[in-house]
Amino acid sequence: MKQNKQRILVAPLNWGLGHATRCIPIINALLEHGFEPVIASDGVALTLLQKEFPTLSSITLPAYNVTYAKKGKHFKLKLIKDSPKLLQAIKAEKKAIKNIVNLQDIAGIISDNRLGVYSKKVPSVFITHQLNVLSGSTTWLSTKMHQKIIKKFKVCWVPDTEGDINLSGKLGHKNTFDIPTKYIGPLSRFEKQAAKPVNKILVLISGPEPQRTLLEEKLLLELKNYPEKVVFVKGVMEKEQTVQVKANMTIYNFMTSKLLEKTINESELVISRSGYTTVMDLAKLNKKAFFIPTPGQFEQEYLAKRLTKLNLVPSCKQEDFTIDKIEDIANFKGLKAFDFEANFEDLFSLFKRE
């Protein structure tokens, strides 16, 4: 008699596209190892994964609806103001998960930064690259709060390597951490291809509003008269893909993985946010880049500064960016991947039925 495949709920946070895209290699690995992934998220993150995996079942979870402040210095204040709304969403999420686990015959849960997606009934995994949650003077408090949530899960997976040569720096590495933790290596949905450069610049934007739009408007203006070929991906998930050609620039609302992989491989340099998923993707593809961190987002500011200090990727504040700054790239090494194969057989053994 054929045994039914175990159903594993994969639930990325809907905050930009990074959490969803780094779940793609995990969903593919689950399929390869004979599991049946069930996707759960909301908004653009859910839309993106539905486009990538049209045959898998998916569930809409309560939305966190967190937006960024217009000014970076108000970022923390805005988050505090939004926190009652966030706590309400997490409460609703916990309730939804209870029903989903019972009704959908879920055998395990993988939550990428969704704080209420766990169950006492089945093994639950939390994915994060932030064992330290940077928030300026309140880093100790935000880290403590985050740890309290991670403790509700059976194990924490960190998408990085454990040693000194790593991508996340102090974000993903703590001296003492009493929660079962596994370093699973950088996660990327992409593969490096030998491709001749077709585009000089590829612009990749994503992330919550209004900062996504503010950067889009600034870069469109800066690149308007740029003489070489530019591909501009806005990171706006819509039902249909749209493409506009304006002189030297080809503008997409979004790209699915295959086209994006091809386009990054064919581009000489990338201008983007310094979100951790972007860092992992560009390292895998050995790319030269220029980073513009989201104003007020401590994590992205830290990653951009760290990679600039290591002489890998130049960066600057959003308000300071001008197209001339990309000339700095020539003096930086660019990102490089280090060979690390995730042992999914071992990681998924958590879900195997006794």
Image (spheres, rainbow, N blue to C red):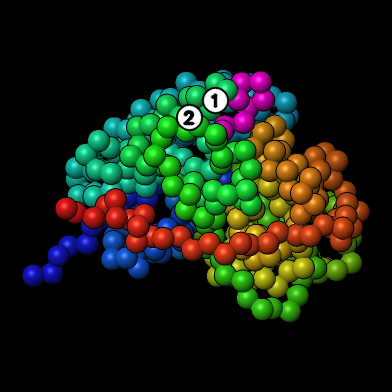
Q: x, y (%) of residue 168?
A: 61, 45
Q: Determine the residue positioned at 63% across, 62% down.
A: 337
* Above/below status of 194 relative to 145: below
Check the image and name the residue furthest to the left.
1
Q: Given contact means CB atoms under 8 Å apart, are the residues at marks 1 and 2 in contact? A: yes
110 or 310: which is nearer to us?
A: 310
Q: Determine the residue positioned at 82% across, 57% down.
A: 332
Q: Is residue 75 left or right of residue 44?
A: right
Q: Which residues are magenta?
A: 132-139
Q: Is residue 246 left or right of residue 146?
A: right
Q: Is residue 105 left or right of residue 282?
A: left
Q: Quadrant of the N terminus?
A: bottom left
Callout 2 amino acid: His
> Does residue 101 appear in this view?
yes
157 or 112: which is nearer to us?
A: 157
Q: Based on the displayed image, in which of its 4 quarters is residue 247 positioned?
A: bottom right
Q: x, y (%) of residue 36?
A: 29, 60
- Give the SS element for disc 2: helix
In magenta stretch: residue 273: no
> Are there few (<14), some (14-19), or many (20+) residues within 10 Å of tag 2?
some
Residue that mark 2 sits on: 146
347 or 152: which is nearer to us?
A: 347
> Does residue 41 appear in this view?
no
For residue 142, the mark is 1
Gap in Å between the C-alphas at discs 1 and 2? 6 Å
